Image (cartoon, helix red, strand yellow):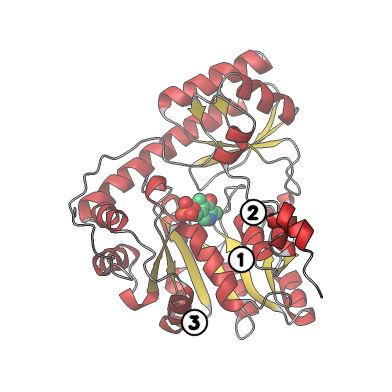
């Protein structure tokens, strides 16, 4: 077929792959606010830590490429996560881990990933970018959005193209955990059939619920971790994949040659010192305390139908009039995350736990919007 020279000359973007031209990119919290011209004084929309820890760079010779995989960061993360260094891959945030899993295990135009919506948006964005199908098994709020293992079993039986199954625990945006018995069933349903990814981006808020103890007997299990949430380092873009050395070896073939910049490794190493981990644990305890206070205050407001229990640093709140509340908060510079377009989440808003001052500002604004109880 001849090139459409005129079209391409006028619009070179039409050379992009069809699936990229059709793609709706991930609606990051920042992107939404920038696109809509929001001013935003109080940011409770991206599940970042509300507190920043100070760091200074210790490695200032930046003329050399970094290590392909920073050894000391891996050693310290292995100590923190109680796994072996061979089980760890350092990535540019958990998001790069998701993309690597799709690109390593799924053939474009043929294979599929499976997810349990409502859940994190990057699983489908990464799949769609790679022209990989997305199989959705929507979960039920009455069941606390627990993945349906029987439905998973059927889907895997029916569709041999499903290569990767994404389960998120604690789940973003619903905040709940996958119970240990259910995790066990997910592991057995996927064994010999697909990679089971458990996204533990928020696991520091419920460390006892980690799937890490299952790794030894489940070589198809991969965990996603990040320094963006409890470790308060969303700005450095540092995450981890934890899995069997054989699976990690495959992912290593696909990752870029120097994915972790020297300053990122420098700061990650400090954050993962014993003192850094202890500071993270104190921060988490404070966040959980403020979360309980915020949940209580929100529940008491008229027009709040439900505040879901949370094992994370955010709350999922169902309002009688979600769209009105979201807009009214926005207009006052308080930015939260609208979840109403996710299945089963009509009128639901996800609110990151802020500082005590930010939470007080939010409650005061909501009182103004909703009236006193
Ligand atoms: C925040 C988040 C991630 C990854 O975030 P990064 O900043 O890329 O590390 C992954 N999964 C879920 C569910 C998240 O909420």
Ligand 1 within 8 Å of disc 3? The answer is no
Can you give x and y, in whole percent of width and height, for residue 50 in the image?
A: 41, 35
Residue that mark 3 sits on? 219
Q: How many marks?
A: 3
* Residues at marks 2 and 1 touching, judged by CB atoms closer than 8 Å: yes
The outermost residue toward the right is 1
Which of 206/225 is in front? 225
Residue that mark 1 sits on? 166
Rendered view: 332 above or below 21: above
Neighbour tally class for label 1: few under 14, some 14-19, many 20 plus, Cα within 10 Å: many
Ligand 1 within 8 Å of disc 1? The answer is no
Which of 30/344 is in front? 30
Along the polypeptide, which appears first: circle 3 or circle 2?
2
Residue 149 appears in which quarter of the rendering?
A: bottom right
Residue that mark 2 sits on? 119
Ligand 1 within 8 Å of disc 2? The answer is yes
* Residues at marks 3 and 1 touching, judged by CB atoms closer than 8 Å: no
Along the polypeptide, which appears first: circle 3 or circle 1?
1
Q: Quadrant of the C terminus?
A: top right
Rendered view: 34 above or below 302: below
Can you give x and y, in whole percent of width and height, for residue 96 in the image?
A: 50, 62
Callout 3: SS: loop
């Amino acid at each position: 077929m001849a090139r459409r020279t005129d079209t391409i000359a006028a619009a070179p973007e039409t050379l992009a792959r069809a699936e990229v031209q059709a793609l709706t990119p991930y609606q990051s919290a920042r992107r939404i606010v920038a696109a809509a011209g929001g001013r935003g004084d109080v940011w409770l929309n991206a599940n970042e830590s509300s507190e920043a820890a100070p760091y200074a760079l210790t490695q200032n010779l930046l003329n050399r490429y970094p290590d392909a995989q920073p050894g000391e960061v891996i050693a310290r993360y292995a100590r923190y996560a109680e796994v072996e260094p061979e089980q760890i891959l350092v990535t540019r945030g958990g998001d790069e881990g998701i993309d690597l899993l799709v690109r390593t295990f799924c053939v474009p135009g043929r294979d599929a990933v499976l997810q349990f919506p409502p859940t994190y948006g990057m699983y489908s964005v990464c799949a769609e970018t790679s022209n990989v199908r997305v199989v959705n098994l929507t979960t039920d709020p009455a069941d606390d959005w627990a993945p349906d293992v029987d439905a998973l079993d059927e889907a895997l039986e029916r569709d041999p193209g499903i290569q990767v199954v994404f389960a998120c625990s604690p789940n973003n945006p619903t905040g709940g955990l996958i119970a240990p018995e259910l995790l066990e069933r997910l592991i057995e349903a996927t064994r010999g059939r697909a990679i089971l990814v458990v996204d533990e981006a928020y696991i520091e808020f419920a460390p006892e619920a980690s799937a890490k103890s299952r790794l030894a007997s489940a070589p198809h299990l991969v965990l996603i971790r990040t320094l963006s949430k409890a470790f308060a380092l969303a700005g450095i873009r540092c995450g981890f994949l934890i899995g069997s050395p054989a699976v990690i070896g495959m992912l290593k073939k696909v990752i870029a040659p120097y994915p972790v910049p020297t300053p990122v490794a420098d700061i990650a190493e400090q954050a993962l010192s014993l003192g850094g981990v202890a500071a993270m644990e104190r921060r988490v305890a404070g966040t959980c305390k403020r979360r309980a206070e915020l949940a209580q205050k929100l529940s008491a407001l008229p027009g709040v139908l439900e505040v879901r229990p949370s094992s994370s640093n955010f709350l999922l709140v169902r309002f009688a009039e979600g769209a009105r509340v979201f807009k009214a908060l926005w207009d006052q510079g308080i930015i939260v995350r609208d979840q109403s377009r996710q299945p089963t989440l009509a009128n639901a808003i996800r609110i990151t736990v802020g500082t005590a001052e930010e939470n007080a500002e939010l409650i005061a604004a909501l009182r103004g919007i909703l009236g006193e109880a």
